[in-house]
Image (tube, grey):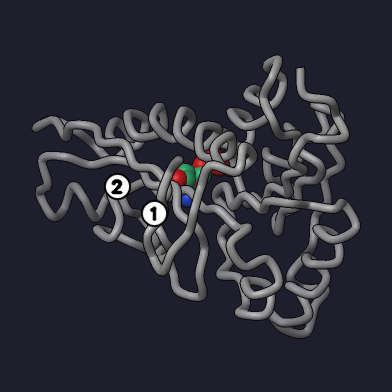
Amino acid sequence: MTSRATLLSLGVLASGRGSNLQAILEACARPGFPARVAVVVGDRERAEALARARGHGVPAFWLNPKDFGDRVLYDEALRRLLDEHRVGLVCLAGFMRILTPGLVRAYAGRILNIHPSLLPAFPGLAAQRQALEYGVRVAGATVHFVDEGVDTGPIVLQAAVPVHADDTEESLSARILVEEHRLYPEAIRLFAEGRLRLAGRTVTIR
Ligand code: GRF
């Protein structure tokens, strides 16, 4: 079994429900999983994600955007928290803020995000609704490295799900979410095991 000292320390950033955080926490609890959640940070006081973290004994911090003059100052505080907890990989899990270039550069190649579409289709908000409105037959989820754009970074893993004729935004989101909860821990495992190689915008899995 991997000893605690050799586990990759994750910093999870989340704004809401926290079901992806929950999937990550559950993966980390499995014997042999090579990572642990060291800290969770949210921008909303009542985010369920913060409560889930505390329920697992993980330090959880609310950074209130109103306490900071601008995004740069906010992200500097965020970075201090991540640094203090010696985070090796930052996982965005429904974090509703765009990271500043300074923070992206500080953790370059060490930030993952999960997005509920087959990128590069449907970046940004309400990806599932965008997919339904466009009329695609296949939707899905993407885990990607974070660069300075919105949902534009190098793709690590993707999974596809069918779109049914009678789908609503809720039913499609639920089908995609099942894949999200499987993909994110898998991507974290690959990163922690040093099996991801980044060249330009291509990720090779060894
Ligand atoms: C997920 O659909 C994720 O892909 C997107 O935001 C949602 C977060 O859900 N980035 P949860 O808070 O993890 O339940």
Kindly identify the residue that appears in the image at 68 percent across and 17 percent down. Answer: 30
Residue 4's quadrant in the figure? top right
State the separation of the CA atoms marked 1 and 2. Answer: 18 Å
The percent coordinates of residue 170 (x first, y second) are 33, 35
The percent coordinates of residue 196 (x first, y second) are 51, 47
- The residue that mark 1 highlights is 155
Kindly identify the residue that appears in the image at 16 percent across and 40 percent down. Answer: 138
Residue 174's quadrant in the figure? top left
Which quarter shows the N terminus?
A: top right
Q: Is residue 63 above or below residue 168?
A: below
Judged left or right of residue 190, residue 13 is right
Q: Is residue 52 above or below residue 106?
A: above
Residue type highlighted by circle 1: Ile
Kindly identify the residue that appears in the image at 37 percent across and 60 percent down. Answer: 202
**Residue 128 image label:** 2
Residue type highlighted by circle 2: Gln
User: SS at mark 1?
Assistant: strand
**Label 1 Cα neighbours within 10 Å, binned few <14 / some 14-19 / many ≥20:** many
> In front: mark 1 or mark 2?
1
Kindly give the residue lying farthest to the front in the view shown.
206
**Residue 177 image label:** none
Report whether the residue tagged 2 is closer than 8 Å to ligand 1: yes
**Label 2 Cα neighbours within 10 Å, binned few <14 / some 14-19 / many ≥20:** many
Judged left or right of residue 167, residue 111 is right
The percent coordinates of residue 39 (x first, y second) are 80, 45
Q: Nearer the viewer, residue 194 or 82?
A: 194
Q: Nearer the viewer, residue 58 or 190?
A: 190
